Image (cartoon, rainbow, N blue to C red):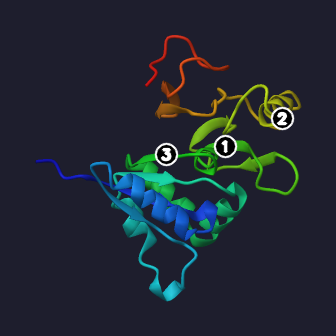
């Protein structure tokens, strides 16, 4: 019998919000995995070895909310360095919203007040990320403006409700709950 996979959740972008963590466990306990989470907004004396925890994972899921604050905390705590080690060791890295932007070189984010701006990510994946993309939304229009103005580097748009799969920095797959939406690549598998 195979052991369940260990999947760590990083709720940093939401300030380690207890409701977000509880929601993670509610969903993750339905899957054949050992869910764990790593809080960074904690009393330092109670924090365990971050590197040991994350490098023991089979997968790491990063939640959404404020990309800019999350990345600043990761850098301060050297989580960015640990995540690069995890990536180099083949740990599956995933996420939504801020948890998607972080893996790319850059992305457009609502982390700053009043408007979407460019946020620099960890750079594991080339190009830019635009979560919640829809060509008709403010986010989609701003993304295309940022591309045209040279503020962002080109990358395939990530339509809201879809997931791209990368292998060695190359997009190799695409899944979505919806069949038809703008930006869907032809001939890809839908779920």
Secondary-structure class at tag 2: helix
In the depicted structure, whether residue 53 falls above or below residue 47: above
User: At 10% from the left edge and 48% from the top edge, which residue is drawn?
Assistant: 1
In the depicted structure, whether residue 185 falls above or below residue 5: above
Left-right relation of 178 to 46: right
Left-right relation of 160 to 152: left
User: At 88% from the left edge and 53% from the top edge, which residue is drawn?
Assistant: 114
* Residue 153 showing in the rendered view: yes
The residue carrying mark 2 is: 142
User: At 43% from the left edge and 48% from the top edge, which residue is drawn?
Assistant: 88
Instruction: Name the spot of residue 164 as percent of width and height, x first.
Output: 52, 31
Pick the residue in front: 83 or 129.
Answer: 129
Circles 1 and 2, Cβ within 8 Å, touching? The answer is: no
Kindly identify which numbered label has been placed on residue 105: 1
In the depicted structure, whether residue 71 falls above or below residue 105: below
Residue 49: which quarter of the image?
Answer: bottom left
Instruction: Name the spot of residue 17 as percent of width and height, x first.
Output: 58, 68
Kindly identify which numbered label has been placed on residue 94: 3
Number of the front mark, 1 or 2: 2
Number of the front mark, 1 or 3: 3
In the depicted structure, whether residue 72 falls above or below residue 96: below
Pick the residue in front: 155 or 16.
Answer: 16
């Amino acid at each position: 019998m195979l052991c369940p996979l260990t999947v760590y959740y990083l709720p940093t972008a939401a300030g380690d919000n207890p409701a977000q963590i509880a929601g993670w466990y509610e969903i993750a306990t339905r899957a054949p995995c050992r869910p764990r989470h790593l809080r960074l907004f904690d009393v330092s004396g109670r924090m365990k070895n971050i590197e040991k925890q994350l490098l023991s994972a089979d997968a790491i899921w990063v939640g959404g909310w404020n990309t800019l604050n999350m990345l600043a905390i990761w850098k301060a705590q050297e989580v960015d360095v640990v995540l690069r080690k995890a990536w180099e060791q083949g740990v599956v890295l995933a996420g939504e919203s801020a948890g998607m932007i972080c893996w790319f070189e850059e992305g457009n984010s609502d982390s700053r007040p009043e408007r979407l701006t460019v946020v620099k990510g960890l750079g594991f994946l080339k190009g830019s990320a635009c979560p919640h993309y829809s060509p008709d939304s403010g986010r989609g229009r701003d993304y295309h403006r940022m591309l045209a103005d040279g503020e962002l580097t080109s990358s395939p748009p990530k339509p809201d409700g879809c997931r791209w799969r990368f292998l060695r920095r190359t997009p190799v797959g695409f899944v979505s709950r919806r069949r038809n939406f703008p930006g869907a690549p032809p001939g890809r598998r839908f779920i």
